[in-house]
Amino acid sequence: MCSIIGYYGKNLAAPILVKGLEKMEYRGYDSVGVATKSENKIMLKKGVGKVIQVNESVHLDDLPGISGIGHTRWATHGKVTDINAHPHTSNSGKIAIVHNGIIENYNELKEKLVSEGFKFQSETDTEVIANLIQQNFEKTSNVKQTMMETVSMLKGHYAFVVIFENGTLAAARFHEPLIVGVGKNSHYLSSDVLGFIERTDDAIYIDNEDFVLVDDTGLNIYNFDGTSVKHQITKVSKEFADVYKGDYAHFTLKEISEQPETILRAGNDTQIDEIVRHIEDSKTLYITGSGTSYNASRISKYLMSKFAKLKIEPIISSELPFAPDSIENDSTLVVISQSGESADILEAVQIARQSNAKILSIVNHLNSSLSQESDVVVGLNCGPEIGVAATKSFTSQLAILYKITDRLCNGCMKPDWNNVSKSVSKTLENHSQIKKLAKTLKDITDIYVLGRGLHFPIAKEAALKLKELTYIHAEGIPGGELKHGPLALMDENVFVIIINPDDSTYSDTLTSANEIKARGAKIIGISDKKSDIYDYWIEIPRIDESLYPLLEIIPIQLLAYYSALEKDTDPDYPRNLAKSVTVK
Ligand code: BG6
């Protein structure tokens, strides 16, 4: 996914656009570019790399003009090159565009345009839109008509912002996020409130299949068939303005360190009561998510079957299109997502809707597409999460699943959240030992994470964090499966993290640790109980048996973070990834 932005106002556009792009860089950081209008000409600068780097070398924020557009890229079509970087201009050079999403029919549109004499510089699907708009504008000389004509020709999921040589901005939304910021004598168009939050907290969340025009007459919103749309200004909650690292070197470390507070703030009682009511009334229950959110959904299966005697089936969102009938009619689907914008979960919701399913969502962004698609929404309340690898959002998702399960079993679990928060703080004190271990792991190529029962989803999440942040091949293994294959991988070059708190899984997991040790592998034990089997023991506080998943992931988040520093990778913006992937 990419970030797109537009500004139309009284101030110089370029510095405002560059600042906004810096805030949204977690959406994609392969290349960056800005285009403005000055003296009835489109001025454009772009380059491969992060915003700060490219701005230092080509001075994006020097561009003149009080109207402009900008983009940070997560490459989908075409290599990471200057040519493929956005903005793209039309052949006449009188139109420039930035785009987030995928145009599925771009090849046939391109062939038609080429046959009508258009030339293409880049490998992107985006340049096709620029030339289509030029062609439609030359036919109508009317921006509104041009937009209606153009969106009627596009297939796929997209949001784009276009600037015309007279400075007019036009933008459209089709299943990709687009938000308008309303300033004093100015308007912002952005993929995320972060793009303009420093300048205004008045936002308009554009509905799907709407387009926007901004010019000297102000802001106008239409739906794709040209009907004018009334719009409502929403105040952006202040917590989303807190996008500063403070004294932390990276957002990832800041967000890991916020967990003692964020776990306490997870979910509010009214929303949780409402989701519990729907779950109690549900016929068949499913839960879905992507990446870390899917690992959180896995935990619910263990919790609800053990404590609430309820069957809930986790489904990987991106797999649902290949087994659409696996959700019976009138089922209930719980959807977990930090951003609420991942394309895979939104498609899973559409498929479930076709079977008349109820959609109950656990999400961080309350104005996201997922929230708009849901019957009930429970907010994570963990504030903006900038680090691409999810950390605090994961433990907030878990806390909400625990609160839901506890209500479903009429308080049979009674989690002591203050004690959980204190125990997380205690676990976070252990930086020095983990920093040292990260040095040891610097040159290893393979690491395995073992866990049984409730700890297996944590083993999966641990492996995901290590992959995302250190680029080390990491795999989460259910403890009992070790001897049915993975044991063949164990030798003196391998490290294995054993998630082994002193609970009902302890002795079986210790047996597995012995089998691994016998093959010469190095063992990192995560536990509240010391054992000679461990080459490295990372101690976690003793806590109620069912609550260990909320603790045991913390040292592994820290290990992945410090290993990333040892390996000189960027913990906040890992290569090839993006905070939430809004394309399939
Ligand atoms: C990936 C992120 O793109 O999407 C992961 O890098 C995240 O951290 C996954 O877990 C799912 O995102 P979301 O927003 O739907 O929870």
Image (cartoon, grey):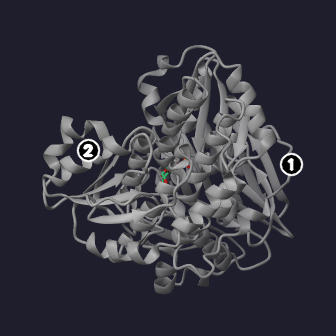
Left or right: 313, with 204 as reference point: left
The residue drawn where x is 13% and y is 52% is 519
Residue at 70% across / 51% down in the picture? 143
Instruction: Tell me where residue 328 appears, x and y as whole percent.
Output: 55, 15
Q: Is residue 142 visible?
A: no
Image vertical order of residue 358 relative to residue 392, above or below = above
The residue that disc 1 covers is 232
Residue 255 in the image, given as x and y percentages of width and height: 58, 66
| Percent coordinates x, y for residue 514 in the rendering | 21, 50
The correct choice, above or below, for 131 with respect to 187 in the image is: above
Using the rendered view, name the quadrant where residue 236 is placed: bottom right
Q: Is there a contact, CB below 8 Å, between mark 2 and mark 1?
A: no
Q: Between tags 2 and 1, which lies in front? A: 2
Does residue 256 appear in this view? yes
Mark 2 to mark 1: distance in Å?
Answer: 61 Å
Instruction: Report the front residue among 97 and 109.
Output: 97
Query: According to the image, label 2 marks what residue?
Result: 511
Q: Secondary structure at mark 1?
A: loop
Report the amino acid beneath label 2.
Thr
Rendered image quadrant of residue 494: bottom left
